[in-house]
Image: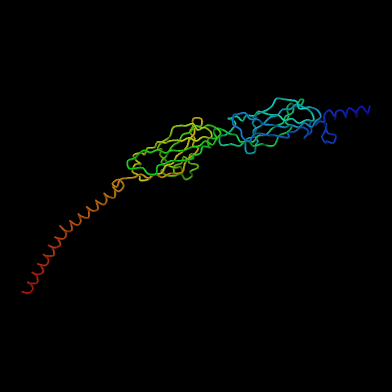
Amino acid sequence: MKKVHIFILFLLLVLLSTPLTSAHSLTDILPKGRLQITGFDAPDIADAGTPFTTNVTIQNRRFLPVNIMIRVDALDGVLSLLEKDIGDTQLFRIPGRSTTTIEISCTLRKGDIVWYKGEYNLQAVLLQQLPILGLTTRDTSTIRGVHINTPQYEQTKLTIKEVTVPEVLTEGQHTFTVELLIQNQGAFDTTAWTRVDLVEKPAIFPELDQYISLRGLGSEVKELGRSKEHLIKTGETTRFTVPCMIRRTEQDKTEFVIEALVFVNQSGVSQQVAATTLYGIRQEQSFLTQYGFWIIIGIFGALTAILIIVFIIRILYPAYYIKKDKLGREKQRLEKKHRH
């Protein structure tokens, strides 16, 4: 009877594939390390909303086959604590003492991404079906970083390659054009438009200008003109022409500063994605227009000086001469009177 008990115990150890040297109890049906993920491959770059393939390698070191399921999660947050399921397999059986590589179609949905983030972390999760317990996590892979191309993030890759701005405007020229050559270095076709502003006062923090609304911190600008919308295909370069007009209040300036901005349409809202440096334009003025104020002051000053001279010659000097002559005669009369 004792030999029968020993045989049954040995048979249970073999059937459950529990290592004889393991320190685990018999209640630990799957000792750690007997079923694990040994490889996880994902593409370096993928597009948001478009399926991409990942490869997960599973090793079953047990003697018996097991039923498993593989899930791929996108980790979110600084500490990668939030998980989003982006792809999985059906429940399948992996033979004992074998290694299997599974292809999993994954999709990072556009609603699961943020426009300013381009890098995401992926992780494969191994789940085993256990009696009563159901699907239980048995292993997780190392984290794999993937760059996800999104229309919103790729719009920031519009690059201004060339800007053509007139240096001098002739007298009476109140309109001019600014041309921009814009290249789309992103992975998606993008619809964009450009605007030219007259900059009254540059912003204290130019990189935050589109987010600052406090007067005194942001730049003070006046729109001079904007272009039509153009579709820029990925990898191509498009020329934008901006017709500009100087307002009547600005026409007496001899020099002004402009800046060109690039915008894209994001769900009906225009978002600035690029800006040029500041360009100065000189506006020629006629002699009278440029120096009219000083000429008027000069003429007024000359007339005033002439009036003062005339006043001195015609009024003050004769009065002084008459008074001097009268005093001389009175002196002579008094001297004669003293002699007598």
- Name the side, left or right, on which 73 lies relative to 271: right
Instruction: Classify 291 as above or below 110.
Output: below
Total number of numbered discs in the rendering: 0
Q: Which percent across, then down, holds residue 282?
A: 37, 45
Question: In the figure, residue 167 lies in which quadrant?
Answer: top left
Name the one closer to the observer, 319 or 259: 259
Quadrant in the picture for the N terminus:
top right
Question: With respect to residue 61, does 336 lie above or below?
Answer: below
Q: Residue furthest bottom?
A: 339
Query: Residue lying furthest left in this view?
Result: 340
Residue at (13%, 65%) from the top-left corner? 324
Between 63 and 7, the one lying in front of the other is: 63
Q: Residue at x 13, y 63 (%)?
A: 321
- The color scheme shown is rainbow
In the image, 70 versus 96, the foreground residue is: 96
Image coords of residue 281 (percent x, y): 39, 44
Q: Quadrant location of residue 289?
A: top left
Q: Quadrant of the C terminus?
A: bottom left
Left-right relation of 197 to 45: left
The location of residue 202, given as percent across then percent down, is 44, 44
Q: Nearer the viewer, residue 54 or 340?
A: 54
Does 308 sit above or below residue 243? Answer: below
